[in-house]
Amino acid sequence: MPAGRITDLFHLLQCSNTDIARFAGCSPSNISRMKSGLIEPARESRSILRLAEGVYRYADHENMTEVLKKLTGKEDADAETLVPAIIGWLYETENYELPESITPRSRLEKEKQRRVFGRRLESVMRGLSFSNRRLAEEL
């Protein structure tokens, strides 16, 4: 299994070892060792299954399963078929290129948009002399 595929997958999902480890139920150091190539578990190993399940759960939590479906070519897949497809993709030996069409917007960009909205809402509330409680009541 090329460790580079895990790195590319994490880049595509914009996640960290800790993110995936949390969803996989294992330690970030296990994920790190697979990602760096220090360990290369067998395709049928429990470690790879946990990694693929963690990747799927993370993507599902972040509403990014479409990215995994496009990457693996399993457009109509559910969790039962997508997890094995992720494992298959990790172990493919052919060269690949990540399509630009499935690259999601940067998390930093999303966070910036949330902060801008928060500042604007805060300004409006200050101008109206609204507290959080009053805004909630009005809504």
Image: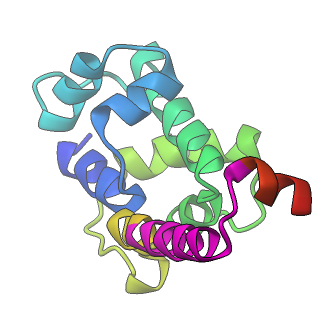
Q: Which residue ends up furthest to the right in the rendered image? A: 138
Residue in the picture at 52% in, 74% down: 123
Left or right, residue 85 beside residue 55: right
The image shows residue 136, relative to residue 27, as above or below, that is below
Residue in the picture at 56% in, 49% down: 59
Q: Residue 108: x and y, percent? A: 33, 66
Answer yes or no: is residue 139 visible.
no
Left or right, residue 83 beside residue 48: right
The image shows residue 16, relative to residue 118, as above or below, that is above
The image shows residue 1, relative to residue 123, as above or below, that is above
Q: Is residue 52 magenta?
A: no
Residue in the picture at 46% in, 24% down: 22
Q: Nearer the viewer, residue 4 or 125?
A: 125
Where are the magenta residues, as a range? 112-132
Magenta residues, dominant SS class: helix
Q: Nearer the viewer, residue 41 or 68?
A: 68
Residue in the picture at 46% in, 74% down: 113
Q: Nearer the viewer, residue 88 or 34?
A: 34
